[in-house]
Structure formats: structure tokens, C-alpha cells
Image: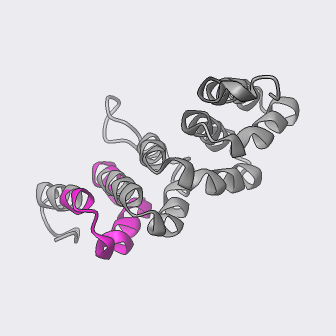
């Protein structure tokens, strides 16, 4: 049903259903769809959101799902100007998994040179609010080469402090 020869509405409904039931058997196929740049952005974003649902309900699967979603963070493909990009949907899906993805995000932040990907990671770390991100965000404020990454790091640290007021003096 997930194959490209089927009508898009059938594929869309099947992908959404797999996310709703958190099908572990579908992870591999959903990752392939999410990563396939020749695939419609509409179908890719469906797969991404379903992966987020599966990861949120199955923490043991995050190690398979998070790297795939992080891998599409720089992809600005979208169906139309009014729809969210692949990257924006990946941020939403990663956010559903919360603290479980923080180590993956930190690792990617440290190794990725794409300023847009780094900015997206910083925003997501702030939204998640895990204290484990403080050191990398503090370093980014002081040393990152990109002004926007530094600026967004300030906001991310602020978000973490709001969620954990007891650490305000440390940051």
C-alpha cells in the first residue's frame, strides 16, 4: 500500500494510520519514504509525522527514528508555499519524542556545519527544555560563527530557564 504506484490518497491514509497505531513493523518503510527526495513532500511529511508518533509511544525505537528525522532537518521541500516543509515537520516529529532525542540533537549540532540545521536544532532544544543542552547552547552563544545560531541559542537557554527556574543563576 505504501508503494509509489498507489494513488496518493491511499498512501496518505495508510501512512497516517500506521502512525496512529504506532506500527513498529512500518518504521523501516516510513524512514525510506521520509528520506526519499524524489517522493512527494506531502507523502514525506506524512511519514515524518507518523515516525514522530511511533517514537513518542515507543521509546526503544528512538535510536532508529531520531537519526532519520535529524537527517532531513535541512530539507526545505514543501508541497506549496502555504504548507510546512519537510524540515519543519521533522522538527515537530522530533519534538513529540521530547528528552529522548536530546542526545541525538546535541551530537548533530556539534557535527553539522549547516547554519539552518543548527538553528533548527537550537530551537528544538529550547522547546524540549532538557538541562543537558545547557552546555552546548552556552558554548554556541559565546562561540558559534553564525549570528542567528548565537541569537537563537539565547532564546533556547531562556526557554530552558523558564522550564527550570532553579537553574537561572547557573545560566
Measured from the top left, where is residue 158 in percent x and y? Answer: 67, 23
**From this viewpoint, which residue is outermost toward the front?**
166
Q: In the rendered structure, does residue 25 fall within the stretch colored magenta?
A: yes
**From this viewpoint, which residue is outermost toward the right?**
143
Q: Residue, x 51% and y 54% (percent of image)? A: 72
Measured from the top left, where is residue 9 in percent x and y? Answer: 12, 54
Q: Residue, x 42% and y 46% (percent of image)? A: 96
Q: In the rendered structure, does residue 11 fall within the stretch colored magenta?
A: no
Can you say whether 150 is above or below 75 in the image? above
From the viewer's perspective, tell me whether residue 145 is left or right of residue 158: right
Measured from the top left, where is residue 52 in percent x and y? Answer: 39, 54
Identify the magenta region: 17-45
From the viewer's perspective, tell me whether residue 44 is left or right of residue 65: left
Can residue 125 be seen at all in this image of the molecule? yes
Secondary structure predominantly adopted by residues drawn in magenta: helix
Q: Nearer the viewer, residue 42 or 56?
A: 56
Q: Nearer the viewer, residue 165 or 90?
A: 165
Can you say whether 58 is above or below 168 in the image? below
From the viewer's perspective, tell me whether residue 51 is left or right of residue 169: left
Can you say whether 149 is above or below 60 in the image? above
Q: Residue, x 62% and y 42% (percent of image)? A: 121
Question: Which image quarter holds the C terminus?
Answer: top right
Q: Residue, x 78% and y 32% (percent of image)? A: 146
Question: Which image quarter holds the N terminus?
Answer: bottom left
Can residue 145 be seen at all in this image of the molecule? no
Q: Where, by quadrant of the figure, is residue 3 drawn?
A: bottom left
Q: Nearer the viewer, residue 135 or 77?
A: 135
Measured from the top left, where is residue 58 in percent x and y? Answer: 39, 64
Amino acid at each position: 500500500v505504501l508503494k509509489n504506484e498507489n494513488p496518493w490518497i491511499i498512501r496518505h491514509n495508510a501512512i497516517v494510520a500506521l502512525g496512529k497505531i504506532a506500527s513498529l513493523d512500518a518504521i523501516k518503510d516510513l524512514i525510506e519514504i521520509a528520506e526519499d527526495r524524489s517522493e512527494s513532500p506531502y507523502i514525506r511529511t506524512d511519514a515524518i509525522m507518523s515516525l514522530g508518533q511511533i517514537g513518542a509511544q515507543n521509546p526503544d525505537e528512538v535510536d532508529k527514528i531520531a537519526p532519520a528525522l535529524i537527517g532531513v532537518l535541512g530539507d526545505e521541500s514543501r508541497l506549496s508555499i502555504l504548507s510546512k516543509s519537510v524540515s519543519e515537520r521533522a522538527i515537530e516529529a522530533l519534538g513529540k519524542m521530547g528528552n529522548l532525542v536530546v542526545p541525538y540533537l546535541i551530537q548533530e549540532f556539534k557535527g553539522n556545519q549547516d547554519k539552518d540545521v543548527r538553528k533548527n536544532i537550537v530551537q528544538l532544544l529550547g522547546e524540549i527544555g532538557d538541562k543537558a543542552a545547557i552546555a552546548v547552547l552556552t558554548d554556541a552563544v559565546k562561540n558559534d560563527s553564525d549570528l542567528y545560531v548565537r541569537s537563537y541559542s539565547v532564546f533556547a537557554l531562556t526557554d530552558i530557564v523558564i522550564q527550570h527556574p532553579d537553574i537561572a543563576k547557573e545560566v
